[in-house]
Every structure is written in structure tokens, then in C-alpha cells.
């Protein structure tokens, strides 16, 4: 028995208990989900591969930060993604702290298609109790409730984690904080001197404490925090000696308020950039193309990007985002109104009817996804031993047969 085995065997306080693992949750926008996706390899103690599965979207029980200038539809994406991440699980929920007072239940229904019944049972929108202390207390109430219910509400995902154990998790809870610059402290709510750098420093300190206390409990209880932050122009005192970028892949003159804790603790750090306006006459919708840049990712390669299609009325479109991806990757043939996927040329469609057919016709939707799947899978991060297996240099029969479990739509 190794020294570590002895520590585990005599561990009465759980200090050497093996950590719980995390599942991944699709946002509903497949090109993005693959762009941030990875292949999970489950092995036993003899290092034999038991299974491999595609982890798409966002990692449960982690912190995600989304930054961007005003008007880049950050809040819309977060709401749509959060609903898609929880909608198929009983006891899953979204806690949305709307500090900017900009969201309504009507808007949530319009961009997610969620029913009033689902909205009431799965989505909580708070516009009043939005101080840092309120949010912390709300999250701790979720922790206490999940702890009290224990195994009775846990979900067996049917997957194995990296150590070959059944992946069993609490139902996902998504906490939306919109946005970081608007956060305030109850302790300072009656303070008349709230505009100076001293107050900003106090808030940054409280935010750091907020993250320090919460991050260790997110994964065990499958609580994901998605924070929205603004992107501001940094003013250097000496224009001749520009300071370094705040984080890699940000520009030198870009600054993110709220201190460094969200940067350090984020599992995923995204930057939203409006790259092209769309109009009804030329594109069929009023909206824009939003470029999503992976500033930091612990499941894929930082510095990569993917584009999403945004409709001003209905939010980001899963269908038009996939069509845009297919066009960009040259997976389409023909001309409008007789477009087709190169892998399935007998099925014709027009640009204007694609979204309706994708949404209402399951067989058409499956065909469209399948036509893009091989291309999207090339974006998945691949671990070294899988590359070795695919190159044929390993001969162990347990490594030659690999089941890659593909997440269905």
C-alpha cells in the first residue's frame, strides 16, 4: 500500500476524498459548443480505456465570464444558454440577478421559448436583492438544500468520468450575474462617497472575497456562475509607454472592471464582438454577426473564435448560426433559393425558409447537423493519448476499440 493509499484509508475528515467530477452542458449553439468542447477519456486503474465521450458546451460547476462592449448581446446569449443547459433536468434552475434592471420575463420567454410553467418552476429573476451579500446568501441556500436532499436528487449521467467512475452529479444550477460593474455592497449602500476610486477598490476587494469563498463549492454542488462584464477603454498615463494587456488575447487598450478575481477563477472567459450588421433586405433578419473569442478556456484552445447569428427579435439563432458556419466552411452548394448541403444535395432549401424547417422538421434538422458534424468535431480538443491511438502506434486491444459517445441534439 502506497503512502497516499494509507492517507486515504485513514482519512476521517474527508481531506483525501477523491474530487467529484463535472459534466458538460450544451448551450444550444452547436458551433460554439464544439468550439469549446473536448473529448473525455475514462480509464480504469490499469490505464485501460473504458469509454470516450464528447463534452460539448460549458463545464458544470465552474465560473464563466463574458465580456464585451455594450450592445453585443451578452445578456441574451447568457439567458438562452442557461435555459438550454437546464431545461431537460428535473430540479435544475436558473438564478438570474439582474443588477442592470434590463431583463423582463417577457424577454426571457421571447428568446428562449420557455413556457410560463417552466419559467415559474425553473427560472428566478431577481431585480431587488442584488447586493453582493444577497447573491452569496442565495447561492449558499442552494448549497444547503442540495446537501440536505443528497443522493435523492442526483443525476446518473450514464457516462464515466476520467477515473472510470460513474458520473453522478447534482442537477445543474446556473447563476447569472448581470453585471459585474453594477455590483454593490450592502455595507456601503448608505455611503454618500460612492464615486471615487476608494469605493471601487472596496467593491473589488469584496468581489475577490465573494469568489474566494464560492469557487471551492461550485463543482461539488454543480453550481455554475456566469458573470457578464463590460469592456472599457484603458487610458494610459504615459501614452508613449503602453501597459501590457490585462489578459492574453485582449488588446492593450482594453480594460475589464471588477478586479482580477473573475479573470483568475474563470474556467471560461469569452469576449463578444459585433462583427457585421444584418438587415432584412440582404440577410432576411435585422441583427448582427457576433464573434465569440475564447480568451481563456480550460477545455479547448484559448485564442480561438466562432461566430453566432443574432436576431434582434428572437435572440441568437441556433439554426442560422449553423447555416452561417456551414457557409463559412464551404459545406453548402447551390444558390439561393436552391441551397443544399454538399453531403446531401437532393434536399434543397432557401435561406429564408431554413430556420423554420430546422426548427419544425426533425429529420431536416438532423440532416443539417450531420452535414456539419465532421467539420465541427475537428474543433474538439483532443488529448495526447487519443492522438497516439488514432495514429496506430498503440496496439493494446482495449485502446484499439474506442467508443465516442456523440451528444445528441
Image (cartoon, helix red, strand yellow):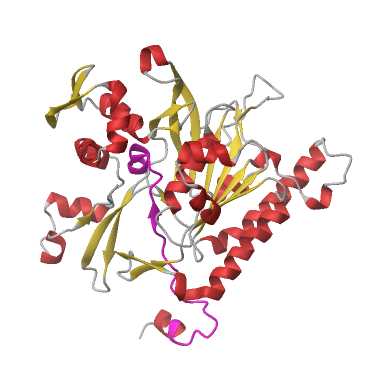
Residue at 24 percent of width and 58 percent of height:
52
Nearest to the observer: residue 216 or residue 327: 327
Q: Is residue 88 left or right of residue 41?
A: right
User: Which residues lie in the magenta part?
Assistant: 8-35
Q: How many marks?
A: 0
**The N terminus sits in image quarter:** bottom left
Q: Which residue, as the protein is rendered here, is positioned at the far top?
A: 281
Nearest to the observer: residue 358 or residue 1: 358
Residue 348 rendering spot, x and y as whole percentages:
17, 25
- The quadrant in which residue 317 appears is top left
Residue at 68 percent of width and 24 percent of height:
235
- The quadrant in which residue 65 appears is top right
Residue at 27 percent of width and 50 percent of height:
408
Residue 394 rendering spot, x and y as whole percentages:
13, 59
- The quadrant in which residue 60 appears is bottom left
Q: Height in image: 227 above or below 46?
A: above
Q: Can you see residue 270?
A: no
Q: Height in image: 45 above or below 349?
A: below
Q: Height in image: 8 above or below 306?
A: below
Q: Can you see residue 52?
A: yes
Nearest to the observer: residue 59 or residue 144: 144
Q: Is residue 59 left or right of residue 142?
A: left
Magenta segment, principal secondary structure? loop
Amino acid at each position: 500500500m502506497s503512502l497516499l493509499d494509507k492517507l486515504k484509508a485513514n482519512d476521517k475528515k474527508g481531506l483525501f476524498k477523491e474530487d467529484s467530477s463535472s459534466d458538460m452542458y450544451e448551450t444550444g449553439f452547436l458551433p460554439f459548443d464544439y468550439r469549446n468542447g473536448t473529448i473525455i477519456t475514462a480509464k480504469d486503474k490499469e490505464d485501460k480505456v473504458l469509454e470516450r465521450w464528447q463534452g460539448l458546451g460549458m463545464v458544470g460547476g465552474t465560473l464563466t465570464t463574458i465580456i464585451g462592449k455594450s450592445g453585443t448581446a451578452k445578456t441574451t446569449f447568457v439567458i438562452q444558454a442557461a435555459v438550454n443547459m437546464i431545461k431537460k433536468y428535473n430540479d435544475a434552475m436558473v438564478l438570474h440577478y439582474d443588477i442592470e434592471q434590463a431583463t423582463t420575463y417577457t424577454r426571457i420567454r421571447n428568446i428562449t421559448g420557455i413556457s410560463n410553467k417552466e419559467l415559474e418552476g425553473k427560472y428566478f429573476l431577481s431585480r431587488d436583492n442584488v447586493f453582493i451579500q444577497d447573491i452569496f446568501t442565495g447561492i449558499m441556500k442552494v448549497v444547503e438544500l442540495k446537501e440536505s436532499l443528497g443522493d435523492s436528487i442526483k443525476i446518473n449521467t450514464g457516462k464515466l468520468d476520467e477515473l472510470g467512475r460513474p458520473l453522478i452529479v447534482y442537477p445543474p444550477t446556473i447563476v447569472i450575474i448581470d453585471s459585474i460593474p453594477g455590483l454593490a455592497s450592502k455595507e456601503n449602500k448608505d455611503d454618500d462617497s460612492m464615486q471615487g476610486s476608494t469605493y471601487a477598490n472596496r467593491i473589488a476587494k469584496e468581489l475577490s472575497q465573494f469568489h474566494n469563498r464560492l469557487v471551492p463549492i461550485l463543482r461539488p454542488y454543480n453550481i455554475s456562475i456566469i458573470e457578464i462584464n463590460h469592456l472599457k477603454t484603458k487610458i494610459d498615463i504615459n501614452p508613449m509607454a503602453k501597459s501590457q494587456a490585462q489578459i492574453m488575447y485582449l488588446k492593450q487598450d482594453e480594460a475589464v472592471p471588477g478586479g482580477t478575481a473573475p479573470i483568475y477563477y474563470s474556467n471560461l472567459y469569452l469576449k463578444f464582438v459585433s462583427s457585421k450588421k444584418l438587415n432584412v433586405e440582404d440577410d432576411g433578419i435585422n441583427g448582427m454577426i457576433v464573434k465569440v473569442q475564447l480568451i481563456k478556456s480550460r477545455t479547448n484552445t484559448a485564442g480561438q473564435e466562432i461566430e453566432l447569428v443574432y436576431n434582434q427579435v428572437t435572440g441568437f439563432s441556433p439554426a442560422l448560426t449553423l447555416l452561417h458556419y456551414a457557409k463559412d466552411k464551404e459545406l453548402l452548394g447551390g444558390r439561393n433559393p436552391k441551397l443544399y448541403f454538399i453531403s446531401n444535395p437532393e434536399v434543397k432549401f432557401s435561406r429564408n425558409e431554413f430556420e423554420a424547417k430546422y426548427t419544425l422538421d426533425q429529420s431536416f434538422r438532423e440532416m443539417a447537423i450531420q452535414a456539419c458534424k465532421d467539420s465541427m468535431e475537428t474543433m474538439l480538443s483532443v488529448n495526447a493519448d487519443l492522438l497516439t491511438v488514432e495514429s496506430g502506434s498503440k496496439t493494446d486491444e482495449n485502446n484499439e476499440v474506442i467508443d465516442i459517445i456523440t451528444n445528441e441534439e
